[in-house]
Amino acid sequence: MKEPESIEGSFHLTGGDFNNAGAASSELKTILTKRGISPDLVRRAAIVTFEAEMNVIIHAVAGVIHYSIAPETIRIAINDMGPGIPDIELAMQEGYSTAPDWVREMGWGAGMGLPNMKKLSDEFRIETVVNEGTTVEMLIYLRKDSHEGT
Amino acid sequence: MTFNKVIEILEADVILDKGHKDLEILSVCSSDLLSDLLHFAKKPQAILITGMTNTHVVRTAEITDIIAIAFVLNKKPEKDTIEMARQKGIPLIVTRFSRFTACGRLFMEGLRSCTEDGI
């Protein structure tokens, strides 16, 4: 069978734009579904993207989600211009959140975002510089024997 | 359990329905914390019982494959929420019961949690 070619694209996010929160993740979910990727993997990719998208909208000034879908992996990378994370270890703890109350009133800021992104992706990397921004890169394997670089 | 049966158990009013009454509901999620839902909603064909009525609820349902939403305490969803649910094909109902009672009633009739282990 002919391998499907890799595709990639990006979404631009604006901090504080709660009206469009989730639009990028929704679009990515549609793209992945149309590509015939299994519902479980689509769901995982959509959730990690949504978590990252909400983080940018809640905490940052702006950000970009870049995705690439290769035959063996989905790569999702999020770069933001934001406050950065002073203590990544703390931020990775379930339940730890710095979201303000008004964000919590909308249903967000439970402190599950980063841990959930790590849990649902096969590879997870985070780099952050305080007062500059954060980059999160996640890989989801489309085959059980996938690994980075293939 | 059919969606119609859920409507009956929750004594709910239908806010948005596009012929979903035969939809099969297999599990239940309940939370007002949307990031918690992204974390624990695992089982397919779940209904969400929530007190949140903003558009983010519909978006979260869409992303986690939740197929129907019930709002508790007679909370009517915002206009934008109904519109987004229409676009995404997610039916909406509203019940006078609290989250606790709504979940309890569905549990008594045999539905279980949408979490991975059903607990």
Image: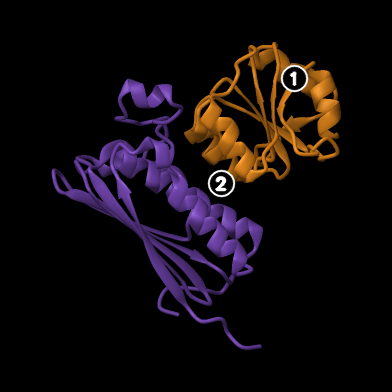
The chain under label 1 reads: B
The residue depicted at 85 percent of the width and 23 percent of the height is B109
Q: Which residue position holds label 1?
A: B13
Instruction: Give the crowd class for mark 2: few <14, some 14-19, many >=20 residues within 10 Å.
Output: many
Where disc 1 sits, the SS reads strand
Query: Circle 2 is placed at which residue position?
Result: B63
Find residue B7 and report its horizontal and vertical position in percent. 80, 24
Q: In the current view of this chain or complex, which residue is farthest to the left?
A: A131
Question: Against A121, is A130 above or below?
Answer: above
- What type is the residue that disc 1 sits on? Asp
Which of the chains is orange? Answer: B
Give how far apart the Cα atoms at labels 2 and 1 are.
Answer: 25 Å
Q: Is residue B73 visible?
A: yes
Q: Nearer the viewer, residue A98 or B20?
A: B20
Which chain wears purple?
A: A
Q: Report the side of B107 relative to B74 (left or right).
A: right
Can residue A45 be seen by looking at this rendering? no
